Image (cartoon, rainbow, N blue to C red):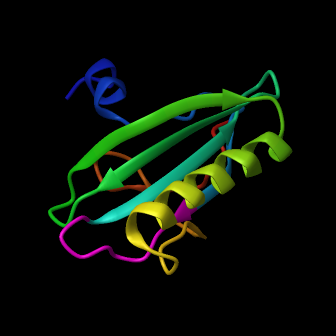
């Protein structure tokens, strides 16, 4: 797979100087999967986010993507996502802060900052 093909398949990529500023995941929703939200701060200070669904078989479906100007606005995105998830799946389903291990497409570990 070429780097260009990898970028086209990725939900979100980190470019030089960008870093992850937040990740959230729901508990497993039977017959649905996990909803996830990931956000990165770009070099211009804006925050790009992606909201996705990861199915039980590991496939990912991008639901929404956007950009905000601050962490306060990002929190509003998380709150709005939680409101919709709870309306659809019940009060116990909400995005919770998550930690992740980052890997390249060939399985190599790396941190959340690209220098």
Image quarter of the C terminus: top right
Question: What percent of the width, then of the height, locates residue 89?
Answer: 39, 69
Counting labels gives 0
Task: Identify the residue shown where x is 18% and y is 70%.
Answer: 31
Furthest-front residue in this view: 87
For residue 70, what is the image quadrant? top right
Task: Identify the residue shown where x is 52% and y is 52%.
Answer: 37
Foreground of the two, 64 or 19: 64
Question: What percent of the width, then of the height, locates residue 73?
Answer: 79, 40
For residue 16, what is the image quadrant? top right
Foreground of the two, 108 or 75: 75
Q: Is residue 101 visible?
A: no
Magenta stretch: includes residue 13: no
Image quarter of the N terminus: top left
Write down the region rendered in magenta. 24-32
Instruction: Identify whether 32 is placed above or below 106.
Output: below
Furthest-bottom residue in this view: 92
Instruction: Identify whether 96 is placed above or below 65.
Output: below
Question: What percent of the width, then of the height, locates residue 106?
Answer: 28, 48
Magenta stretch: includes residue 25: yes
Task: Identify the residue shown where x is 67% and y is 56%.
Answer: 79
Instruction: Identify whether 21 is placed above or below 41.
Output: below
Task: Identify the residue shown where x is 73% and y is 44%.
Answer: 74
Question: What percent of the width, then of the height, locates residue 62?
Answer: 35, 39
Foreground of the two, 5 or 26: 26
């Amino acid at each position: 797979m070429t780097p260009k093909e990898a970028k086209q398949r990725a939900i979100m990529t980190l470019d030089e100087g960008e870093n992850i500023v937040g990740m959230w995941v729901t508990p497993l929703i039977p017959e649905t999967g996990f909803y996830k939200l990931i956000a990165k701060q770009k070099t211009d200070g804006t925050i790009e986010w992606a909201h996705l669904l990861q199915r039980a078989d590991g496939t990912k479906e991008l639901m929404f993507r956007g950009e905000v100007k601050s962490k306060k606005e990002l929190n509003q995105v998380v709150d709005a996502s939680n409101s919709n998830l709870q309306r659809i799946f019940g009060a116990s389903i909400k995005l919770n802060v998550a930690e992740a291990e980052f890997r390249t497409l060939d399985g190599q570990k790396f941190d959340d900052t690209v220098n």
